[in-house]
Each structure stands twice: as C-alpha cells, then as structure tokens.
Image (cartoon, coloured by chain):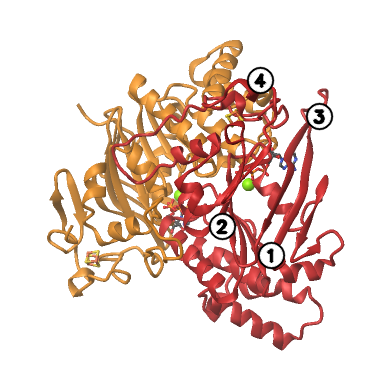
Chain colours: A orange, B red
Amino acid sequence: MSALLEIDDLRVTFGGTAAVRGISLTVEKGETHCLVGESGCGKSVTSLAVMGLLAKGGKREAARLSFAGEDIREYDEKRMSRLRGDRMAMIFQEPMTSLNPAYTVGSQMTEVLRRHRGTPRAQAVDRAVELLTRVGITAPGLRLGQFPHQLSGGLRQRVMIAMALMCDPELLIADEPTTALDVTVQAQILRLLAELQKDLGLGILLITHDLGIVARVADRVSVMYAGEVVESAPTAELFRAPRHPYTRGLLSCVPVPGKVKRGDPLGSIPGVVPRIPPGFSGCGFRDRCSFAEAACAGPLPRRDVGPAHEALCILPEGVPA
Amino acid sequence: MSTPAIEVRGLRREFRASQGLFAAPRRVVAVDDVSFSVPAGSVLGVVGESGCGKTTLARMILGLMEPSAGEVLVDGKRLDGMDRRARARLIQPVFQDPFSSLNPRRRVSDIIAMPLVAQSNVTTSEVNRRVAESLERVGLSTEQGTRFPSQLSGGQRQRVAIARALVLRPRIVVCDEPTSALDVSVQAQILNLLAELRRDLGLTYLFISHNLAVVEHVASEVAVMYLGRIVEKRESEALFRDPRHPYTRALLDSVLTPEPGLGVPDVGLGDIMPDPANIPPGCRFHPRCPACFAPCAATTPRITSLEDGLVECHLAG
Ligand SMILES: Nc1ncnc2c1ncn2[C@@H]1O[C@H](COP(=O)(O)OP(=O)(O)OP(=O)(O)O)[C@@H](O)[C@H]1O
Ligand SMILES: Nc1ncnc2c1ncn2[C@@H]1O[C@H](COP(=O)(O)OP(=O)(O)OP(=O)(O)O)[C@@H](O)[C@H]1O
Ligand code: SF4
Ligand code: SF4
Ligand SMILES: [Mg+2]
Ligand SMILES: [Mg+2]
C-alpha cells in the first residue's frame, strides 16, 4: 500500500529565492504528520505546492508527488480543483485567503458541497450547521447569514475549519489552524480532528509553531530549516532524543509551565534564517550553529540516527543526546 | 503606598452588533464592570477565552476607545481629561500583528520617530538621537532603520513596534499578544528583550496572551477574564500552583505542554461557546462549569478576597 500523500524531492523557487529545497515526506491514512520550523523556512510554500496553489512566479519540481497512489504532478488545474476541497482539503494560515468577503458564510460553505457532490441546498445547509456546531460556534444559523468581516478572528478561523471538513476529506493540510484561538477552543478543535481521524481515517499534514500541539497530536514530526527537512522522527523519539543542532535549539526555546523560573531568560537561537539563493550548497544553519566546521559547507549526509529517525548533518550521531 | 501605574474602576464597554438589515441589533457587553490596579514596575498578565474582552479592555486603558462607563487612571491621572500628547508619553501599545500595525510605505526610522515628531516641541537632532537610541535598545542596526517593514522578518518587525513604543520613554506598555504571530525562537528573543527593558527602565506592562506558559514566565500577577468579567486575579505563582476559579482550572488543564503521548485533554466545558450578547443569569460560567451547584444558576457570585488576590465564585465564598 502506498501512502496517502507522498512527497519526494519537492523543490520550489521564486525567482532568486529557493523556498523549498528537496523535501521528502509522507502522510499515511489516519496519520498526523507535523511540520515545524522557523518563520520563512518554507512550510506554507510546501503545502501550497502540494495543493497546486503556488503564487505566480513560483516554480515547482518533484521526483514524485502522489495522492492516494496517483501521481498528481501532471494534473491540470481542472483535475486539481476537483480534488481540492473534496478529497484533499486545506486550512490556510491567513483565514481571509480562503473566505470570499463578498459572500455569506452559508453560501460559501454550501457551495463546496454543491460543486463537488451536487448536494441539494437544504441538505448542504444541514451539513454546514452540523459542522459549525462541532467547531463550537453558537447560533450557527445566525453565522450562516453573516459575511466574513462580521466575525471575530477566532470565529473566522473556526468557520474555515468547518468548511474544510464539508466533504469528509481523506487528506487535510492545516497551516497554523489554531493560532488565533485560546487554549480551550484549541483543545476542542484538536479533539475534533482526532475523532475524524479515528472514524474516517483522515490523514493530516499539520503545520504549527506550537511544540505543545506537536507533542500531543503528531505521530511523526519533520523539522524544517531553510527549505529542507533537517530532521524527521516519530514524535516521542524526536522529543526524547533530538539530534540536529537546530531541533535542539528549537526545543530549548519553549517555555514549559512550571519549568522556567520567572526572570530567567528563555533559551533562544541567536541570529536569523538566511536567504537561500538557488545553487546554495552545504548546511543552511551553519552561520548559527555552534558545532559548525569546514565540512558543513560541503554536501551533507542524511543519516539514520535512531529508529525511523533521520537527520541531515555532518555529525555522525547528531548532537549527543 | 505609591501610585499604581494603572487603575481602572467600574470599567464597562458595550457594542451594538448589527445582524443585517431587518433584525434588531444585539447588545454585546464586551467588558462588564471591571476594576483593578497594576502597581508600578509590575507585569499584569491577562488571559481568557477568544472574544472575552481582552483587546477591548486594552484599548480603553490606552485611551483608544471610550468606555461606556467607569474610569481609567494612568499614573494617578484620569485618562479622559488628559492631553493626547501627554498620554502618549505615559503609555504606549505593542499590538499582535507586526504586519498590519506598521505603515508599509514609511521607513523603519520614520515609523519609530512618529510619536516623537507628534510631540511638536522636539528638535530634529533630538529626534535622530532618540530614534538611534531606540533602535539600539531593541537590537536593530542603523542600516535596518533605513529599510521598509516588508524587508524585515516577523521578529524584526515586532522589534520595530517595540522601538516605536519606547521612543517616548513611556512608563507603561500595553502588549496585546505581542508574540503570537512569531515562532518560538523569535518569541524567546522578544520576551527576553521585554524582560531586560523592564529591569533597565522600570517599565510596567499589561500583557495579554493566549499562551499561558508565556504569561507564567513574564507576569507578576494574572487576571483571568471570562465573558467580560475578571473572574480571578492572583499573584502569578499562586494562580498557576493553585487556581481557584473553575474556569481558570479549565484553562490551565487545556495547556498542551510539549510532552508526547499525553494526548489532548477534555476539560469538560462542553462544546458550545458562550454568546456575549446573551449572558447567562447567576454565574455567567454556570452552563459550562464542571463544578456548578445549587446557587450558581440563580445568584451572581460576589468577589471574594484571598490573601494573594481575588476570585468570583460561590465555591470560594
Ligand atoms: N509569493 C512569493 N514570492 C516570493 N517569495 C515567496 C513567496 N511566498 C513565499 N516566499 C518565500 O519563500 C520562503 C518560505 O516561505 P513560507 O511562507 O513557506 O514560510 P513559512 O515556513 O510558512 O513561515 P511562517 O512560519 O512565517 O508562516 C520565504 O523566504 C518567503 O519569503
Ligand atoms: N467594534 C466592535 N463592534 C462590535 N462588537 C465588537 C467590536 N469589537 C469587539 N466586539 C465584540 O466584543 C467582544 C470582545 O472582543 P475583544 O476583541 O475584546 O476580545 P478578545 O478577548 O481580545 O478576543 P481574542 O482573544 O479573540 O483577541 C467580542 O464578542 C467581540 O465580537
Ligand atoms: S551540518 Fe554542520 S552547521 Fe549544519 S547543523 Fe550539522 S554541525 Fe551544524
Ligand atoms: S459560581 Fe458556580 S458555576 Fe460559577 S464558577 Fe463557581 S462553581 Fe462554577
Ligand atoms: Mg507559513
Ligand atoms: Mg484580542
């Protein structure tokens, strides 16, 4: 059996910027694969590339890009648009990119079902009400009649999540789905996704800055830096024994309740992500890495450093655990 | 006792939310009779559900929004009588979104200079000197001062927002989710910077965040809001060790610490969020409260004083 989503050696450039530089990952049916990494490392671009939604000027290449066993690299826009919102759904980082300000929430939600499934309007409305209720929206009937700008940020975010679930997708790509929400609502949404996963075998590619979410919901984690996956492992393994220097740094930045003394500085990684021109070689992290040496400017090995655990680094065992 | 940096008394704010052409507008009480004070040099963290009124409260304290009732005193002076320029010297905001809160067509140094220039009695050389000082304070280079916001990363833009807030050397800074758009390593840099500024300049912060671990790290006291009320306010250490209000407990239990294998907890609040236009009678939390008992649906709980703060719940009374 092939994976639900298979990405092999995905590359995306925008003119003089290499945004994604040879990413490979898979999402199995019923699995949650989390993608983490610093701002600008290429997480959103990766997801947009998979959905065939790159902005103008973005160029995509891949050795393989398959959904449910079918290679979608050569799909034209018509075939892709039939998949999107139906078997493959996406929750965007910026809610306003997927909500049209000119239409009510109700007409946008029902349109998804009508277009893909030909569902009659009354039935589509029932489905929309059901999903809005499940994402914790009071008075769903009222919300259906409202326009996106009449909703608070948190409500808009929940509408988007409900809309992505209208057609019972097989794959959900969710880009920072709960960032604007407080922790109780966040927990509710994450539980809903877990339920759908159990009931329907939904596969999820989840992009988030929040390592707490990663620890609690991911089966597998891929850590990105400067357009590459620098480390990938099953969740417990990654938190127990992070091997790449960047992953180490990332984990030390998280304030853990009860663990950091007030007033003590938090761990942080000095410096910023470099801009990577096409043709760049060697480790993208080397000007911030305390283990860097001359060899880091050359080709890097991708090594097995533990059970189902890979790191892209010259250190043979990664940073000692 | 010295004058508190911020004092609010009986603060209230209502909105009329239109429901389209034909329905009557609904009245939303976003902040409902809130009183508290923040001692100079301390950090009050404010947490609570999305839509519970945190931003509305912050905007009233900044003088950017008129209260429907009640008053705000900043450094002992009433906000409503205060000249705008005097107010700007006393209290400044840092908002969540470093993308939309900076003018994209102005250079960074001009953005930072704006509050100073608006003061009118400041010379150009003084402006330049203070802008340079602010840039340095937040760790930006002179060269970065010549760029446009779009040419900076998210974390650098948030530094610009902080530099702009500091250029008048205010006593108080109101931070509304200052790091929620940022990734963890940039978040750590910004929080460390805010802590350092407080130590060096003796600033007072009102610090709003959804991230409870961040609040625990920075706040000396924490106020928990629910549907427009402060339902618990305690010393930070006490609140996190021994939360007294059932909603505070639910919040703390919902925090996802980076510990694999524990899953996402169900804290028993039910799946339906409260409606701010339709506030329940009695205790406004009672339809969702796991600890709800006889008096809760009918009688509004009073504020109970504790040794280290206060709580509004029948269980504490
Ligand atoms: N339309 C575009 N044109 C040019 N460059 C782009 C475009 N979209 C993204 N990029 C660049 O590609 C890189 C990766 O961006 P991406 O949005 O994927 O980051 P991200 O990992 O999602 O970051 P964040 O955590 O901040 O959302 C960045 O350097 C970004 O500037
Ligand atoms: N201009 C407005 N017109 C109508 N209602 C408003 C307006 N501003 C805020 N509200 C309502 O007031 C309530 C409080 O909103 P506020 O923005 O203060 O919440 P918040 O606690 O900051 O939420 P979040 O955590 O999502 O930022 C919400 O119900 C909101 O819909
Ligand atoms: S390859 Fe070199 S620079 Fe890169 S993470 Fe490994 S040790 Fe550091
Ligand atoms: S007063 Fe009653 S309903 Fe309200 S929080 Fe306390 S126990 Fe719960
Ligand atoms: Mg992104
Ligand atoms: Mg807010």
Q: Is residue A54 visible?
A: yes
Q: Position of residue B140 (x, y in %)?
A: 52, 75
Q: Give the Cα distance between marks 1 and 4.
A: 40 Å
- Label 2 chain ID: B
| Image location of residue A227, percent across then percent down | 34, 56
Disc with the residue nearer the chain's start (3 vs 1): 3
Measure how far apart labels 2 and 1 are at the Cα level.
Answer: 13 Å
Q: Which mark is first along the chain, 3 or 2? A: 3
Q: Is residue A307 left or right of residue A196?
A: left
Amino acid type of the residue tagged 4 in the rendering:
Gly
Q: Amino acid at mark 1?
A: Gln
What is the chain letter for disc 1? B
Q: CA distance from mark 2 to mark 3?
A: 33 Å
Mark 3 — residue?
B25
Ligand 1's quadrant? bottom left
How crowded pointer 1 is (Cα within 10 Å; few <14, some 14-19, many 20+) is rated as many
Q: Kindly check if marks 2 and 3 are in contact, taking CB atoms under 8 A apart as contact.
A: no
